[in-house]
Image: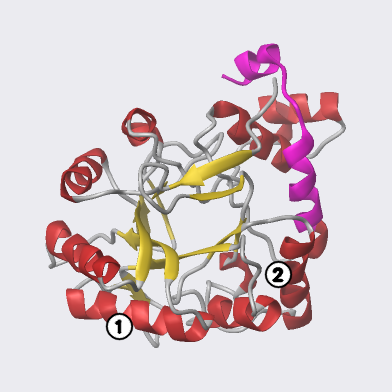
């Protein structure tokens, strides 16, 4: 089965962005617990430089990774940026001094986050921003999203997407304006709601139909999470057929599952990054996809 090699974000707008259908998520470049500087700073910078060298055109980051660690690393490694590079950031969350995850979605919070992202990434406009929905918010979803659309009108944001949303929120957002992408948890073993780092993380499975109907790219996170031993995992069986790792087949499965999926696997090791890149060339047969389910 051949896979589609590119994907277009904001295809229904006047400023669509077409990128290679394989990105890189920077979250793993931070220290333990997604906090502080990377354990190996030189390797983190080398990975970011390798994204450019390997044709990666989509980077996923957030100013609450670190805090500000991944943004600063991106700027140090890649600025001035290639014209075809799309940097996607997220707003709606913050980190406390105790390393806790906090809701940060009031209009003034979102504006402060956007300004901070512009500053740390050294750019004048963010091409794609995902509004991250956090549990326990006291701000209405509509008020937060309206603040995002206002900053889009001001030119600070080109495209707006959503992260960690459910069906009701996505439908509400589509009635308010153009939604360019959705970033939820999704992978071979991660398709529904679960908890990680004390947060409720919503899966993509429930909203895939809405995304497909509206031609909205789906950007999965936690796509390489695995809880099954190799002896019980169909992925591992297919991996043997391709002389590949289970992680590589996970990524190949995503690429074959739907043309609207843009994988963004993250890693803090250059060797793993190169393995992930190689997954883009793996072709699964219809029989293998049927076997995987």
Magenta span has 77? no
x and y, in percent, of residue 13 in the image: 36, 48
Is 132 situated above or below 125? above
- How many numbered dots are placed on residues in this image? 2
Measuring 56% from the left and 27% from the top, which residue is drawn there?
257
Secondary-structure class at tag 1: helix
Residue count near mark 1 (Cα–Cα under 10 Å), binned few <14, some 14–19, many ≥20? some
Secondary-structure class at tag 2: helix
Magenta span has 288? yes
Quadrant containing the N terminus is top right
Identify the residue under disc 1: 112
Is 103 situated above or below 51? below
x and y, in percent, of residue 83 in the image: 62, 65
Is 240 situated above or below 187? above
What is the chief secondary structure element of the magenta stretch? helix
Q: Residue furthest top?
A: 287
Q: How is the image coloured?
A: secondary structure
Depth order, front residue of 139/87: 87
Residue 95: tell me if it is visible. no
Residue 78 in which image quadrant? bottom right
Residue count near mark 2 (Cα–Cα under 10 Å), binned few <14, some 14–19, many ≥20? many
x and y, in percent, of residue 245 in the image: 79, 39
x and y, in percent, of residue 120 in the image: 50, 84
Q: Is residue 66 left or right of residue 235?
A: left
> Label for residue 48?
2
The part of the chain drawn in magenta is 272-293
Q: Is residue 49 left or right of residue 90?
A: right
Q: Residue furthest right?
A: 243
Measuring 72% from the left and 34% from the top, which residue is drawn there?
230
Q: Earlier in the sequence, mark 1 or mark 2?
A: 2
Is 264 situated above or below 34? above
Quadrant containing the C terminus is top right
């Amino acid at each position: 089965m051949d896979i589609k090699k590119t994907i277009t974000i904001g295809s229904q707008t006047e400023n669509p962005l077409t990128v290679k259908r394989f990105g890189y998520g920077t979250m793993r470049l931070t220290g333990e617990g997604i906090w502080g500087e990377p354990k190996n700073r030189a390797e983190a910078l080398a990975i970011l430089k390798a994204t450019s060298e390997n044709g990666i055109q989509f980077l996923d980051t957030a100013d609450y990774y670190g805090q500000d660690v991944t943004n600063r690393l991106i700027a140090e490694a890649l600025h001035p940026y290639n014209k075809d590079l799309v940097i996607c950031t997220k707003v709606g969350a913050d980190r406390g001094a105790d390393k806790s995850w906090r809701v940060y979605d009031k209009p003034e919070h979102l504006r402060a986050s956007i300004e901070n992202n512009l500053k740390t990434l050294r750019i004048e406009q963010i091409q794609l921003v995902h509004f991250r929905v956090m549990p326990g918010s006291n701000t209405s979803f509509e008020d937060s999203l309206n603040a995002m659309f206002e900053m889009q009108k001001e030119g600070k944001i080109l495209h707006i997407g959503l992260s960690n949303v459910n069906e009701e929120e996505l439908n509400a957002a589509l009635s308010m304006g153009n939604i360019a992408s959705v970033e939820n948890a999704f992978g071979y073993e991660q398709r529904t709601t679960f908890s990680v780092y004390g947060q409720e993380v919503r899966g993509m499975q429930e909203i895939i139909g809405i995304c497909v109907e509206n031609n909205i790219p789906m950007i999965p996170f936690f796509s390489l999470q695995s809880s099954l031993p190799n002896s019980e995992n169909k992925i591992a069986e297919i991996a043997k057929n391709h002389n590949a790792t289970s992680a590589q087949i996970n990524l190949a499965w995503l690429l074959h599952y739907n043309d609207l999926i843009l994988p963004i696997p993250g890693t803090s090791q250059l060797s793993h990054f190169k393995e992930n890149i190689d997954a883009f060339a793996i072709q699964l047969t219809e029989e293998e996809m049927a076997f995987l389910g």
